[in-house]
Amino acid sequence: MSEIAAIIDTLESRVAKLIAKIDSLEGQIVTLKQQIGTSETAARKQVEELASMKEAYETLKTANALLGSDENKRETKLKINSLIRDIDHCIAQLAD
């Protein structure tokens, strides 16, 4: 009978260790999920900032070309032509 009691005690201690390990791993999962959320928020913020900077860069390029720079004249002319087409389209819709 003492052998069975020893086996039961061993099993109980192993189960207790496993439960403690499970609790520890669940805590790590919660921490990692929080870190993922923080990282995703930071990544979204960086993507938005990058888009904003790209837009500002394009605006500056256009302004620079309009001020007489020879580097981006073709792009500026294309942009102006696109804006003119958009305005013509709007006028045509208003006329209908």
Image: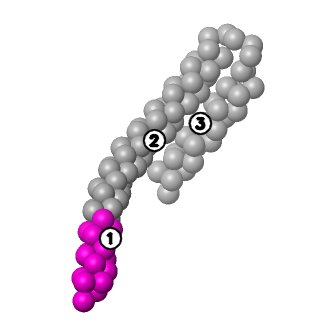
Residue range highlighted in magenta: 1-19
Q: Give the percent coordinates (x, y) of residue 39.
A: 41, 43
As rendered, which of 84 and 2 lies closer to the eye? 2
Give amino acid for label 3. Answer: Leu
Q: Nearer the viewer, mark 1 or mark 2?
A: 1
The CA span between labels 3 and 1 is: 74 Å
Check disc 2 and give the amino acid type.
Ala
> Is residue 67 visible from the viewing direction of this image?
yes
Residue closest to the eye, 12 or 4: 4
Q: Which residue is mark 2?
A: 43
- Residue 23 appears left or right of 44: left
Q: CA distance from mark 1 to mark 2?
A: 42 Å
Q: Tell me which amino acid carries mark 1.
A: Arg
Which callout, 1 or 2, points at the residue further toward the start of the chain? Answer: 1
Residue 45 horizontal/vertical position (percent): 41, 38
- Asked if the residue at tag 1 contacts the one at tag 3, i.e. Cβ–Cβ closer than 8 Å, the answer is no
Q: Residue 64 at x, y = what percent? A: 62, 15
* Label 1: element kind: helix
Where is mark 1, residue-wise? 14
Distance of mark 3 from mark 2, alpha carbons? 33 Å
In the rendering, at what x and y percent does residue 43 appear?
45, 41
Q: Residues within 10 Å of mark 2 (few under 14, many from 20)?
A: few
The residue that disc 3 covers is 83
**Which of label 3 and label 2 is nearer to you?**
2
Residue farthest to the bottom, as pictured: 1
Task: Identify which residue is drawn at 34% across, 54% down.
Answer: 28
Q: Classify 26 as above or below 81.
A: below
Magenta stretch: includes residue 57:
no
Q: Quadrant of residue 16?
A: bottom left
Depth order, front residue of 36/48: 36
